[in-house]
Image: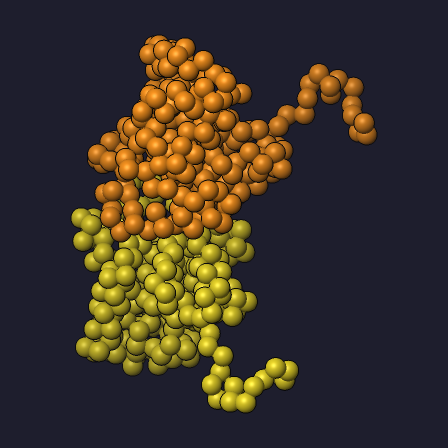
Chain colours: A orange, B yellow
């Protein structure tokens, strides 16, 4: 190949990295999760899928639930916005789940019990169940069915969510998110610390990541 | 001209209309105000500039000030986001004004004391003073200087802001915004009632307006 230098096959050109912070109860994280893979590939950026919980972060701000429930008018706009954005993105018709925000603890722990290679597909499948099929992702049966469909050992993985290492990993992610100044999801953080909040900033975050590589 | 039918010169083809709801203290309204004119022209859409006050709307939600002050981490991201977006939009370097949120009552009243033709240029000049020059737009001298520079009778217009008709127009705008379900600025509302919140939705709102014409 043209331009290859000695040693490059071992060393590999360093790819710019983007941390994708997402919360399974978050509607806009759903959009980002469904859009991110072709975009990072096109940008030549490495993405790290980092599930975390917004609950503790909202609680630290004095909220007991999603801001979309705290502010009724904002919530009403969000549902309409999601329907329009899903249509524009070529996603299935958006379905407002009965339970919102979902209790996302189980799904987040399963995502961390899986290895990094399997995490994206599982995460997308959870979001699809939640926001295209209106399922309750806090339901162990729903999560087990998703795992089985992806060829995983559902029983073993659900058992793993009770292990201290998995619980601690999710707690550590959430604490790191808070330390980084993350206040909502999705958020995109570059190695430089540059932070972008919201599905609307995915393209901009990737442009920055590309520039820094 | 090709395709002109009898009577069209008088009747004029009906243009789709978009109401641009903005608040002078709002950073993202600034971005929309600076971007909107070429975009509406390209889309063949008529824009109506509608200043209103967010204060009473926030108060109804139990907030005494901007959500960017209520939520510190969100505020921190917003300033950084604005700096990045201004650069991308080719605007002057973003300057965080000392007083945020600005008391926007005076500027909003002056905007409504002006006629619809003069409102956009005045509004853009206020935003530039506030977010590119760091001025306090609650200062009568700053507003007077803006009016003079635009060739208006500053003294007469400032006097007009004390008139009941102008005060009532601003109150009516704010009440209409609330009735429409507006909870933040900028917001874009089509004749159908379809509402889009945020500078990030300007392009989508125009695409919808175009489709409906």
In this rendering, position of residue A51 left or right of residue B139: right
| Foreground of the two, A41 or B58 | A41
Identify the residue at image location x=61%, y=34%: A41
Quadrant location of the N terminus of chain B in the rendered image: bottom right
User: Quick check: A16 above or below B89?
Assistant: above
Write down the quadrant of residue B28 in the picture. Answer: bottom left
Identify the residue at image location x=67%, y=25%: A13
User: Visible in this render: residue B178?
Assistant: yes
User: Visible in this render: residue B69?
Assistant: no
Callout count: 0
Instruction: Point out residue A143 in the picture as x, y percentages from the top left corner.
Output: 38, 23
| Foreground of the two, A46 or B164 | A46
User: Quick check: B1 above or below B170?
Assistant: below
User: Quick check: B50 above or below A190?
Assistant: below
| Foreground of the two, A206 or B111 | A206
Instruction: Point out residue B128 in the picture as x, y percentages from the top left corner.
Output: 43, 62
Instruction: Point out residue B163 in the picture as x, y percentages from the top left corner.
Output: 21, 78
Identify the residue at image location x=37%, y=30%: A24
Instruction: Point out residue A180 in the picture as x, y percentages from the top left corner.
Output: 39, 30
| Foreground of the two, A91 or B29 | A91
């Amino acid at each position: 190949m043209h331009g290859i230098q000695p040693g490059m096959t071992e060393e590999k050109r360093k790819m710019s990295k983007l941390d994708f912070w997402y919360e399974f109860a978050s509607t806009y994280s759903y959009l980002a999760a469904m859009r991110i893979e072709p975009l990072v590939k096109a940008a030549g950026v490495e993405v790290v899928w980092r599930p975390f919980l917004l609950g503790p972060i909202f609680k630290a701000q004095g909220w007991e639930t999603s801001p979309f429930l705290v502010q009724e008018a904002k919530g009403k706009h969000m549902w309409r916005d999601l329907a329009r954005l899903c249509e524009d993105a070529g996603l299935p018709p958006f379905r407002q789940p009965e339970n919102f925000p979902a209790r996302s603890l189980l799904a987040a722990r399963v995502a961390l019990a899986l290895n990094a290679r399997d995490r994206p597909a599982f995460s997308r499948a959870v979001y699809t169940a939640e926001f295209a099929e209106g399922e309750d992702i806090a339901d162990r049966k729903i999560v087990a069915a998703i795992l089985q469909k992806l060829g995983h050992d559902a029983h073993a993985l659900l058992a793993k969510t009770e292990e201290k290492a998995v619980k601690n990993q999710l707690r550590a992610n959430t604490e790191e998110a808070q330390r980084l100044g993350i206040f909502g999801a999705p958020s995109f953080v570059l190695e430089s610390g540059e932070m972008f909040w919201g599905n609307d900033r995915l393209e901009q975050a990737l442009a920055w990541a590309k520039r820094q590589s």
